[in-house]
Every structure is written in structure tokens, then in C-alpha cells.
Image (spheres, rainbow, N blue to C red):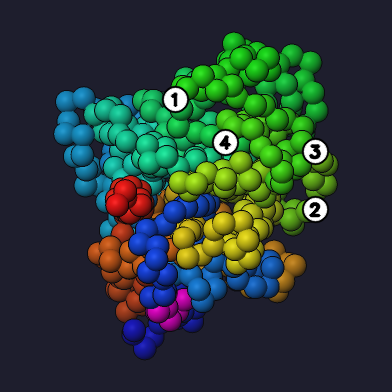
Amino acid sequence: MSAHVPLFVLALCVHSLCSAFAQERPIEDPAFASPRNIILFVADGCGESTHRALELWQGSPPIYQGPEWSRYNTTTFALRTSIRPSRNLDPLEQDPRLVYDPAKAWDTTPTDRAHGEYPFYFQGYNWLRATASDSANTASAIFTGVPTYRGAINLDGAGNPVRSLAEAASDRGLAVGVVTSVPFNHATPACAAGAHVPKRELYHQIARQMFTSGVCDVIAGAGHPKFDRNGFPREEPKYTYISEEDWSALRTGTLTDADGSRWTLATETETIRSLATGEVQLPLFLLAPVAQTLQQTRTPWALRDATPPGGHPFIENMPTLRDMTLAALNGLDDDPDGFFLVVEGGAIDWAMHDNQIGRMIEEMADFVRTIEAICEILDAGDRGFDWSNTLVVVAADHDHLLLGPESDTMPFQPLTDNGPGVLPGYRWHANTHSNQPVPMFVRGNSSSVFADIPTTPDTHTAPDGTVFERLPYFHQQEIGKTLLNLFDQHAESEPKEP
Ligand SMILES: [Zn+2]
């Protein structure tokens, strides 16, 4: 590294690199050649700074930055920026302008231009914003291994359905569950649940597919038609996320899965919490009594709100992401073939869009508490599964451009530390996504397979000699490809008749 690297760049490099370079390949139990269970956490809209904000607020790194975990970086760019399939193009033809390029990303050439209320300051910030993905194409890549256009739910660039992880898991006999802190059929959970539609806004169609395809055993999230964003009953129901017809079938217990099983509906917080133990009837739909997000959209709500975490009272008696995940896990973990559980910290992205630093940290904290709860269960190993037969992946779908307080003059300055319990120094550079690579963490059975994925260095030397460097990266589609391979091995490693 160059001798005249400013301190903040060094800090960025050290923070980004040391955890991975200190890793050794995890020791795995040879009795389990592939994982029986896979738990995939997805932090929506969560880049390096998002993880760092929680760490600075709490005064300690989140659990997945511990020594048992391996860290990678993934790029998140879309196949194309169009929001509809291109039937005349090769389904895998990549728009070269979107491909992550360290020289363009780290470009420190000053610029006076702006988009909306957010000046670019540097050409790199401009490029990272202009080439960003959306949560549908990123989730499709993660859950199918195939990159696609913005807005696609598990379709390729030409609009053809692509087999997803949930379908592969279900085909292998695994129980499948999807949990989120945003509407249950928003882009990420829709992809996680194996839906296939050309446009992410087709909520009624997505919901119908999620309930009737026979793929999912548990679905959990927000988006209740009869409650507002503060969890108060609405005068008139609002059927944004589910059709009136499907809602009334759920209410009367007549909505059935592909094999004729009736969906059980749980919408009361106490009921949802009680499902963390005891007998659970599948298929199960946990619908939190709130319109959009568990907590992030509660009032008082304002754009660019700098109120610290917990500074506004939480909605009382609302299930957390952790509550819903523990109930979902209890429903899945009796399956003798294993389970595939996806948990999305969806409202992290909503808080990032709204430039609400405190609510973003609240959402990260709930997400991390959920991971901690799962780790405790895996550590204890008294429910028939542990780290030797379970793989845990903590991924993110894309970044937002959140940087340090002087990042208008100091390119790529990281967040600054003001001590635990005090908001870090920060500056928002957009109210939407960026093309920066995002961290990913893995632990457990077969976690070493990610070390075999080829990577590209993410380094750039500015004209003044400043060296910018992050971990080498692979594209997030490799997550999907790798997990699909593991599901296929799962089938091959099934006990055979002698
Ligand atoms: Zn977003």
C-alpha cells in the first residue's frame, strides 16, 4: 500500500480486510458432506457502512464478524437497467455499462453536478448511483444464480422462469420458510419463496403463487390489509399485498396449498410468539398486524430523521423479526429431510431510502438479534441440528451510498466513531441504491465452498497516489449457484438402500 495513504483509507482497508485474511478454513464434520439445513439471512440495502453503523452504536461488532465466520464481498449489478424482459436479446447478455469497475467506482475526480438534492461531489459517487440495482434483480440473482433485469422476480433477462433455491429445496423434500420485516411478498421474500413474475409490483399474483405453488411451508411478514402502519385497525381494509378473495379464503381456512393442505393463519402477536415452541400446523402464514413494516414506518415519521435508535416509542406488542423467525423455525425443524429458511431484514433498506440513521440501526439490531438467536440454537445443538449439519449465510442484496461526515471533500471517508450509544458521523449521498460491493458472512457445514469461488481484486490508485482497496469480490449470483449445488449434493448424499 502507498506510503501516503490518508488514515481514513487505511482504516477502511483494515476494517474490511483483516477479518477475512485472519480466517482459516473451517473444520467440518466429514459425516455431513453437505448441509442438511441452510439458513440464509439477507440484509436488504446493507453495505459496509450499514454494518459499521450498528457496530459503532453498540460498541462491538455484530456476531457474524466473529472468528468462526468467513467474510466475502459480492457485487450486485443488474443484467440490464430496463424494467421489463427483453425477448429479442440473449437472456444472459450483460449490459457492460453496469459491470462493477473499481476504476469507475473509486474515481475521485471532483464534479459540480447533482441529481435532485444530492450533489455527486466525485465522479465515483455519480457512477455508483447511476449503475445501481434494485431489490428484485439482486434477489433473483441470489435465489436463482442467474442475473436479470430490474424488477424481475426469478425470471431471466428474456422473461423465462428460472428454478430458484426454494423450489430446489422443496424438490429435495426440505421444509421451506420465508420471513421478512416488510410486506410478506415484497421483492426479496417473493424471490426467496420461489415466485416467478415479470414485475415486482404484481403483489396479488405473487401472493397467490406463494400460497398455492406447494413450495413454502411457512411465510411470515407484514402487509396486513386491516391494520395501518402503526398497527391500528383501519376503517376500510386495503388490499395492496393480497387480494380480497385470497384474504377471505385465508380467514375462513379454505386457502389450500398445491397438495390440498389448508393454510393456518396467525395474526395476533401473542399467538405468533407462542408458536416458537410446541406443535405447529403447516403450512403456516404469520402476518404481523401492521400495514407495511414491523416498526420502520411508524409515526412520527420523517425523511432524513436523525433521531437515535429508540428515540421514538416502538409500536407496542408488535412481533419482531426474531419472534417471527423463531416461530417459523419451530415449524420447519421437524422435517427429517432438513429445512431451508430465509430471513430478510427488509426494513433496513426502507430506513436507508428515507435517510433515517436511527431507524436503520434499529432495523439492523433486530436483524442481528435474530441471527444471534439462531446461533444460540445451533450452539446448543439440542433440537436435532447444529453447526455440523447446518450452513448459515448472512448476505446483503445491495448497498446505499452512506459515508462519513466529510465525504463531500474526503472521497469515500468511512463513518466516524463517536462512541457507543452516540450516532456515528455520517453523510447520505442518495435516497436510493448504489453499486458498491456488499459484505457477506458464512459459517457452518460446507461454508468453505465459498472460498473456491474466483474473485476479482477491488483496488484503485487515485492520481494523487491514494490507494483505495476493499476485499476481492465475486458476483452475488455465485451465492445462488453455490447453494443450488449444495441442494443437488443433498439429494446425492441421501442414504441409499443397501
Ligand atoms: Zn431499496
- Report which residue position mark 4 lands on: 218
Q: Is residue 451 above or below residue 275?
A: below
Residue pictured at 54% horizontal, 58% vertical? 385
Of labels 2 and 4, the one closer to you: 4
Q: Secondary structure at mark 4?
A: strand
Q: Is residue 48 visible?
A: yes
Residue 236 placement: quadrant: top right
Residue sitting nearer the eye, 211 or 198: 211
Identify which amino acid the numbered label 1 is placed on: Ser
**Residue 59 pos. (x, y %):** 68, 73
**Residue 397 pos. (x, y %):** 45, 49
As measured in the structure, the alpha-carbon distance from the residue carrying label 2 to the one carrying label 4 is 33 Å
As measured in the structure, the alpha-carbon distance from the residue carrying label 3 to the one carrying label 2 is 25 Å
User: Pointers 4 and 3 in contact (CB under 8 A)?
Assistant: no
Q: Is residue 220 left or right of residue 275?
A: left
Residue pictured at 71% horizontal, 46% vertical? 277
Q: Secondary structure at mark 2?
A: loop
**Residue 148 pos. (x, y %):** 30, 38
- Report which residue position mark 1 lands on: 213
Residue pictured at 54% horizontal, 62% vertical? 386
Q: Is residue 483 left or right of residue 212?
A: left
Q: Is residue 45 above or below residue 20?
A: above
Q: Secondary structure at mark 1?
A: loop
Q: Secondary structure at mark 3?
A: helix
As measured in the structure, the alpha-carbon distance from the residue carrying label 1 to the one carrying label 3 is 29 Å
Magenta range is 18-24
